[in-house]
Image (cartoon, helix red, strand yellow):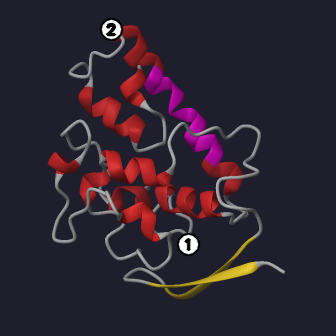
Amino acid sequence: MKKTVTVNDKMQKNYVYALSEKPGKNFDQDFKPELTPKEMLELGVFGGKYMTDCREEFPRGWFRKAKLCSEKHDPELNFFGVNASQPLSVWRQKGWIHPDDPRGWFQWYCRYFMGRRHEDDKRQIRRWKAMKRHIVQIENNCFPGEWDCRKRQRQAVLHWAYDSRKM
């Protein structure tokens, strides 16, 4: 029997989904994120604002050392200390948002990591893979470990579960 999760936060009311896999297991063969959602939250992503009202949905451990700010988006909380986000309105305008994941890719990834499998998985994995073009730009223009080189691009890549500290 599958476990179900009911979401009641600022963006979703009574949204229910099923978990069909164990957390962190049985990912699509083309999807190999380098960071877990917990690691991303601890490093500092999305200006700390992204997950401030979602704590009930995900494991408490994800939030123990997370860099969060419920009042505002604060780029200084990001690992590279820069803003690398576009407003949600831009994401919606570009058609990047699936109705089941109104916060976007990272929400999809958190739910996928927890074991949800969904009709949008293939599209989101394609989007994740497309970030490799940014990795190539970092690798072609920066020395390994040169964190001041292309900080915004490094932060954006970090938002997609690629560990840009290692590039």
- Measuring 41% from the left and 17% from the top, which residue is drawn there? 137
Q: Position of residue 66 (x, y in %)?
A: 32, 58
For the question of whether residue 91 can be seen, the reply is: yes
Residue 7 falls inside the magenta stretch? no
Whole-percent x and y of residue 113? 61, 57
Q: Residues within 10 Å of mark 2 (few under 14, many from 20)?
A: few
Q: Which mark is residue 143?
A: 2
Q: Which residues are magenta?
A: 125-135
Q: CA distance from mark 2 to mark 1?
A: 40 Å
Q: Nearer the viewer, residue 9 or 3?
A: 3
In this rendering, position of residue 154 left or right of residue 19: left
The secondary structure type at the circle numbered 2 is loop
The quadrant holding residue 158 is top left
**Residue drawn at (48%, 35%) of the image:** 162
Dot 2 and dot 1 residues touching (CB under 8 Å): no
- Residue 26 in the image: above or below residue 8: above
Q: x and y percent of residue 10 in the render?
A: 37, 82
Q: Earlier in the sequence, mark 2 or mark 1?
A: 1
Q: Secondary structure at mark 1?
A: loop
Amino acid, disc 1: Pro
Q: Quadrant of residue 56?
A: bottom left
In which quadrant of the rendered image does the C terminus lie? top left
Q: Residue at x 56, y 34 (%)?
A: 130
Mark 1 sits on what residue?
Answer: 99
* Tag 2: amino acid: Phe
Q: Is residue 15 left or right of residue 103?
A: right
Q: Mark 2, mark 1: which one is toward the viewer?
A: 2
Q: Is residue 37 left or right of residue 146?
A: right
**Is most of the magenta stretch helix, strand or loop?**
helix
